[in-house]
Amino acid sequence: MTGPGGLDAQLRFAPRGLVADVHLAPGEVLAVLGPNGSGKSTLLSLLAGLLRPTGGRIVLDGEVLAGEDGRFVAPHRRGTALLAQDALLFPHLSVEANVAFGSRSAGASRRAARDVARHWLDVTGTTDLAHRRPHEVSGGQAQRVAVARALAADPRLLLLDEPLAALDVGAAPEVRRVLRQVLRGTPRRSAVLVTHDLLDALALADRVVVLDGGRVAEEGAVADVLSRPRSAFGARIAGLVLLAGTATADGLRTGGGTLLAGLRDDDCPPGSAAVATFSPAAVAVHRDDPGGSPRNRWAAAVDELAPRGDLVRLRARLRPGGEEVLADVTASSVADLDLVPGSPVHLVVKATAVAVHAVGRPAPRAGGGAGGTR
């Protein structure tokens, strides 16, 4: 059943407010990120056939799985495989029988299913576990077996629902390595990966979609989204401060009236919707207005101080606009400035450290055509 895995999906599910378009080129891995409640699990359930969409359509390799004239293909006939947080192995079957289950269910002979199972056990490094029962293997081993079982079904599209979230820090890297090997091997496999972990996106995905409130807030190549985020969540996972507003000739004006000077992208004309991003490490904190030449100099009040390794992460609210800005400062600076929640401060950022990007412009999808929609 292995196919190229090209996906063209307009996903609509009114009960949970999801309106998102998702496109996948053959052999591509798409990471879906977003805050809790943004629609990630709903998106995956619609692709898997666990939910029936209330509109739109889902097309995989040219086959309509849902949408036209009420057509709805059952989950087991879609050519998709879902790998969840928990391995969910059949407790009464051996590891080998678990991996062979998909092939046997599809009508393969016992011998053929066993050969397929042994191949994927070898690929995932679990051959030595073949005759054990699930209760006799560790969590990391069980998840590698679950990867083997999913691939033994020869899916056109692999759906990954936070597959490393339930693993401890020792087991996760090995399972991540296995996933990278099978997804980026030859032939490459198409997959949609829902994750909260930035490392998963960096290690496994070609592109990222950020969902927020059931809509696609931004999408693009992994490196582009992380270095040039256009949504609050994208900025948060990239470790950047993001302020939204309207582009000006030399930067941005927020909705609260705060002016930022920065380096504006060529595709971001004055008057257009835009975001400004900068690193918390670029923010200098002063008790008194330092004066001088910096154009980005704002009065603020400290909201919170939180240790982050050798540094302290300061959260402050600008006055009078109310925008939140983060700053990373040393513990000695906190002591020297006598900073506590409520302390008035002045924040300074060099204009050269501020990048201003356009928003509302989805990235083109691989192979041509439009990407996701807002």
Image: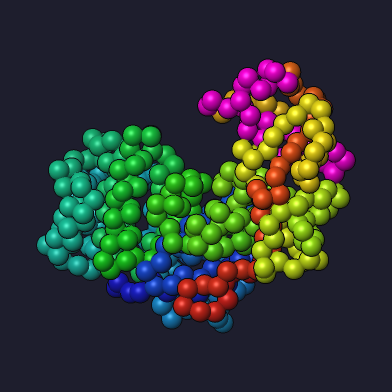
Q: Quadrant of residue 69?
A: bottom right
**Image location of residue 162, percent across then percent down:** 45, 48
Vertical side of 60 occupied by 167: above or below: above
Q: Which colouring convention does the figure follow?
A: rainbow
The residue positioned 44% from the left and 72% from the top of the image is: 25
Q: Nearer the viewer, residue 110 or 243?
A: 243
Residue 174, given in percent of the width and then of the height, sits at 30, 43
Residue 201 visible (yes or no): yes
Q: Is residue 325 magenta?
A: yes
State the image quarter where residue 155 is shown.
Answer: bottom left
Left or right of 184? Residue 329 is right
Rendering coords of residue 132 (x, y %): 18, 40
Q: Is residue 9 left or right of residue 301?
A: left
> In the image, 137: left or right of 360?
left
Q: Is residue 84 visible?
A: no
Q: Is residue 107 part of the magenta span, yes or no?
A: no
Q: Is residue 4 above or below residue 241?
A: below
Q: Which contiguous range is marked in magenta?
A: 309-337
In the displayed image of the protein, which residue is found farthest to the front? Answer: 292
Where is residue 315? Give x, y as percent: 70, 33
- The quarter of the rendered structure image containing the C terminus is bottom right
Q: Residue at x 28, y 55 (%)?
A: 181
Instruction: Work out whether residue 134 or residue 355 is closer to the camera in this orientation and state it.
Output: 355
On the rendered image, what quadrant is the N terminus found in? bottom left
Q: Is residue 49 left or right of residue 80?
A: right
Total labels: the figure holds 0
Q: Residue at x 60, y 52 (%)?
A: 234
